[in-house]
């Protein structure tokens, strides 16, 4: 299970002020599917990406011109030819600990993540969910079920 998050604006700032550090983060992301490619029949990873990180990746489209030939392709994080290799987990958009939020805001966080997750990974629904910092309470079950999640990783 890998959990990846960048606060809103952080990667943008690094790309403009410390491009070398930003590239290291992006290459680490790119390394996930590349390291599994030799083990497509064995390798399995559950990957959680915050909505803010997904937005940044989408916005920049991580152009090969800026990052060289190692620009991350989001499609690699959920490969169509081996969808079982990387399971992209739904999450809270801003990486917030949902049990500490008002109930209406919880569902909004989940729905917002689903909006970008479905768009980037070409899936009509997500089966699995990871609650940031493993913050979970039973009151999350109804909104997760309404959004179509089948299972949740909990502590």
Image (tube, rainbow, N blue to C red):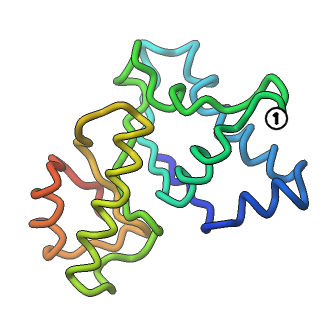
Instruction: Depth check: give the residue in front, 112 or 25.
Output: 112
* Residue 42 image position (x, y, % from top left): 43, 18
Which residue shows up at 44% across the image and 38% down it? 120
Screen quadrant of the C terminus: bottom left
Q: Residue 69, located in which quarter of the rendered image?
A: top right
Using the image, determine if residue 44 lies above or below residue 131.
above
Which residue shows up at 30% across the image and 33% down it? 123
- Left/right placement of residue 107 relative to residue 39 reads left
Question: Is disc 1 placed on a helix, strand or loop?
Answer: helix
* Residue 35 image position (x, y, % from top left): 63, 24
Which residue shows up at 37% across the image and 35% down it? 87
Instruction: Depth check: give the residue in front, 9 or 91.
Output: 9
Q: Residue 117, located in which quarter of the rendered image?
A: top left
How many numbered badges does the structure rendering display? 1
- Left/right placement of residue 117 relative to residue 106 reads right
Q: Which residue is mark 1?
A: 67
Crowd band around label 1 with a 10 angstrom C-alpha radius: few (<14), some (14–19), many (20+): some
* Residue 118 image position (x, y, % from top left): 34, 41
Which residue shows up at 55% across the image and 23% down it? 36
* Residue 109 image position (x, y, % from top left): 34, 68
Name the outermost residue toward the front: 59
- Left/right placement of residue 13 relative to residue 72 reads right
Instruction: Depth check: give the residue in front, 142 or 64.
Output: 64
């Amino acid at each position: 299970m890998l959990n990846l998050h960048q606060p809103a604006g952080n990667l943008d700032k690094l790309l403009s002020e410390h491009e070398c550090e930003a590239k290291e983060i992006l290459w680490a992301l790119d390394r996930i599917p590349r390291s599994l490619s030799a083990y497509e029949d064995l390798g399995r990873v559950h990957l959680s990406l915050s909505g803010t990180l997904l937005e940044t990746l989408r916005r920049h489209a991580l152009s090969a011109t800026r990052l060289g030939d190692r620009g991350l392709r989001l499609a690699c994080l959920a490969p169509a030819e081996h969808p079982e290799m990387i399971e992209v987990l739904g999450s809270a958009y801003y990486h917030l600990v949902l049990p500490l939020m008002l109930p209406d805001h919880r569902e909004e966080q989940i729905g917002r993540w689903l909006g970008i997750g479905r768009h980037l990974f070409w899936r009509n629904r997500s089966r699995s969910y990871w609650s940031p910092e493993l913050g979970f309470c039973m009151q999350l079950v109804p909104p997760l079920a309404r959004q179509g999640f089948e299972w949740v990783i909990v502590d």
